[in-house]
Image (cartoon, grey):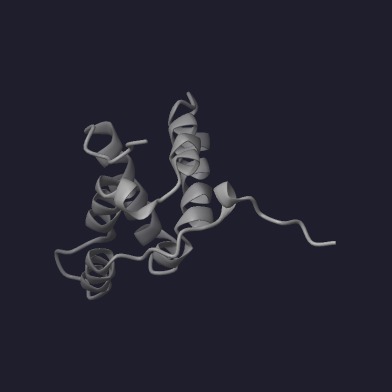
């Protein structure tokens, strides 16, 4: 028997146009990077995640004291709940730059974490 996902575990189908454009610009090189894409995605999180329970899971992750574990958990959360967005972010250095921007937005208190 297959495990059924609850409504709270369903990934968002969101991949906003602004995010696609930022990833495209970053992929072209030059002065654009995935940092901006990460920052802007965090800034508009509530607009792209419909379920409060999913945002609450992220907030619990952000309370993690170990920074390396927190970053790993954020990546896992993004892959689970915003998979279409994360498919646009390459692994390696670009993924690190994306995560730096995402976390910086949260540290700047600019992330949309409304529920």
Q: Nearer the viewer, residue 30 or 2?
A: 2
x, y (%) of residue 83?
A: 48, 62
Q: Quadrant of the N terminus?
A: bottom right
x, y (%) of residue 95?
A: 39, 57
Residue under the point 35% across and 61% down: 94
Residue under the point 52% across and 58% down: 11
Residue under the point 46% across and 52% down: 78
Which residue is the extreme one toward the front? 7
Residue under the point 29% across and 65% down: 16
Is residue 55 shown above or below 7? above
On the rendered structure, is 113 left or right of 5? Answer: left
Q: Quadrant of the C terminus?
A: top left
x, y (%) of residue 33?
A: 23, 61
Q: Nearer the viewer, residue 48 or 93?
A: 48
Total number of numbered discs in the rendering:
0
Which residue is the extreme one toward the left? 31
Is residue 34 shown above or below 28? above
x, y (%) of residue 57?
A: 50, 37
On the rendered structure, is 28 left or right of 75? Answer: left
């Amino acid at each position: 028997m297959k495990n059924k996902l609850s409504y709270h575990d369903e990934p968002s189908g969101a991949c906003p146009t602004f995010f696609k454009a930022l990833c495209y610009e970053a992929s072209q090189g030059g002065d654009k990077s995935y940092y901006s894409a990460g920052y802007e995605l965090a800034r508009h999180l509530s607009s792209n995640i419909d379920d409060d329970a999913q945002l609450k899971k992220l907030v619990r992750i952000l309370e993690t004291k170990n920074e390396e574990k927190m970053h790993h958990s954020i990546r896992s959360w993004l892959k689970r709940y915003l998979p279409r967005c994360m498919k646009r972010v390459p692994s390696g250095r670009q993924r690190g730059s994306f995560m730096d921007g995402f976390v910086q937005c949260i540290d700047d208190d600019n992330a949309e974490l409304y529920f």
